[in-house]
Image (cartoon, helix red, strand yellow):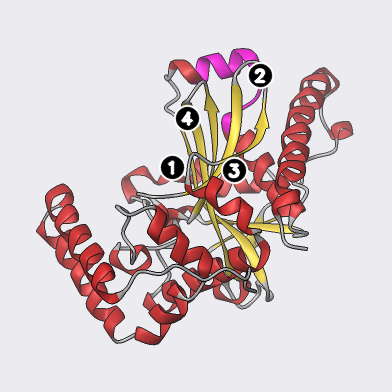
């Protein structure tokens, strides 16, 4: 779907300059091997010129590349991984097309400037908290979009995601676009900001608020499931930190009704699945009811904030 305005897109020389600049940046920041990987990825894309042309023909992607001039334009191929460690090159290129086709088809043009800047506010609280939806820059390979929970400008939690064709996630995943949550990261447990959050929202966690907002995004778009990446497929996974990744991913998704889906993730219902209050011990029900009311408010606010900016 086209919004009627010409799609700005870099010409060949601009794109070549962007790739070379990013390769030099990666070499200085990460070493020669990473810089060479960027160039090899670009060389691979020369053989996929049709895919690249299709990608830059999507106005949502072209505007993003021109807005974030220092970002890597081939993030989906120049990094070691994109969305899932188990995605091969063909799946990575197909997935980036999936996502930006979805954005173009469902996001109204008025939403894009906010996404490419400081983000669109989806929820706020009188104590100074807010959740914003924004396009990623440096970490776009972990998901083109993120939900950020902030307190007075400080980020407490980030949940990144993309929309991909479900068939890419496994033979049992069905078909059609599905919201694929690929990064679930909070500040360290010792961070003063987390202590303050727990004082303001007892028995709660920033990650719960991020997932609640993601449920609101899914509801606004009429989607009834979310897929969370498996711990071992998360692109930053390290065997020496397997227990930590399991808590942040597989166990976390399972706690909200997640069930294994294909080799890449866990499928969760929307709204999130939680145990009925009647199944909890009586002394825990009041606290659980309060926690869930916070989640409901976050999800409802996110759905209400995003809905006016969606194409009908």
Name the secondary structure under disc 1.
Answer: helix
Say if 57 sits above or below 142 in the image: below
Give the left or right position of residue 105, taking residue 135 as reference. right
In the image, is residue 309 part of the stretch drawn in magenta? no
User: Residue 155 has which mark?
Assistant: 4
Decide: few, some or many residues near mark 4? Use Cα within 10 Å; few <14, some 14-19, many ≥20: some
Which residue does the numbered mark 3 point to in the structure image? Answer: 252
x and y, in percent, of residue 282 in the image: 86, 21
* Distance CA(mark 4)–CA(mark 3): 20 Å
Say if 65 sits above or below 51 in the image: above
User: Residue 201 has which mark?
Assistant: 2
Decide: few, some or many residues near mark 1? Use Cα within 10 Å; few <14, some 14-19, many ≥20: few
User: Residue 262 has which mark?
Assistant: none
Q: Earlier in the sequence, mark 2 or mark 4?
A: 4
What quarter of the picture does the C terminus occupy?
bottom right
Question: Which residue occupies 52% across, 68% down?
Answer: 59
Q: Earlier in the sequence, mark 3 or mark 1?
A: 1
Name the secondary structure under disc 3.
Answer: helix
Question: Which residue occupies 54% across, 41% down?
Answer: 119
Q: Earlier in the sequence, mark 1 or mark 4?
A: 4
Q: Main secondary structure of the magenta part?
A: helix
User: Residue 243 has which mark?
Assistant: 1
Q: Earlier in the sequence, mark 2 or mark 1?
A: 2
Q: Is residue 257 visible?
A: no
- Give the magenta-colored segment's residue range: 194-206
Q: Earlier in the sequence, mark 2 or mark 3?
A: 2
């Amino acid at each position: 779907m086209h919004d009627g305005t010409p799609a700005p897109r870099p010409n060949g020389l601009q794109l070549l300059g962007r790739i070379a600049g990013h390769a030099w940046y990666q070499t200085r920041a990460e070493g020669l091997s990473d810089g060479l990987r960027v160039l090899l990825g670009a060389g691979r894309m020369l053989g996929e010129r049709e895919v690249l042309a299709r990608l830059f023909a999507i106005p949502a992607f072209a505007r993003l590349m021109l807005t974030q001039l220092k970002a890597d334009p081939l993030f989906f191929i120049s990094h070691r991984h994109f969305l899932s460690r188990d995605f091969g090159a063909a799946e990575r290129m197909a997935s980036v097309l999936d996502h930006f086709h979805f954005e173009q088809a469902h996001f109204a043009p008025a939403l894009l400037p906010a996404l490419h800047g400081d983000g669109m506010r989806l929820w706020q609280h009188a104590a100074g908290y807010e959740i914003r939806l924004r396009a990623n820059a440096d970490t776009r390979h972990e998901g083109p979009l993120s939900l950020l929970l902030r307190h007075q400008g400080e980020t407490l939690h980030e949940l990144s995601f993309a929309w991909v064709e479900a068939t890419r996630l496994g033979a049992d995943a069905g078909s059609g676009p599905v919201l694929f949550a690929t990064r679930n990261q909070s500040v360290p447990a010792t961070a003063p900001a987390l202590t303050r959050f727990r004082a303001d929202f007892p028995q709660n966690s920033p990650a719960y608020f991020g997932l609640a907002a993601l449920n609101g995004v899914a509801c606004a778009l009429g989607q009834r499931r979310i897929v969370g990446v498996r711990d071992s497929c998360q692109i930053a996974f390290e065997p020496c930190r397997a227990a930590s990744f399991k808590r942040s991913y597989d166990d976390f998704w399972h706690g909200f009704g997640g069930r294994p889906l294909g080799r890449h993730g866990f499928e969760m219902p929307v709204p999130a699945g939680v145990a009925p209050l009647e199944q909890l011990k009586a002394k825990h029900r009041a606290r659980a009811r309060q926690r869930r009311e916070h989640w409901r408010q976050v999800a409802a606010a996110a759905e209400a904030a995003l809905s006016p900016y969606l194409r009908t």
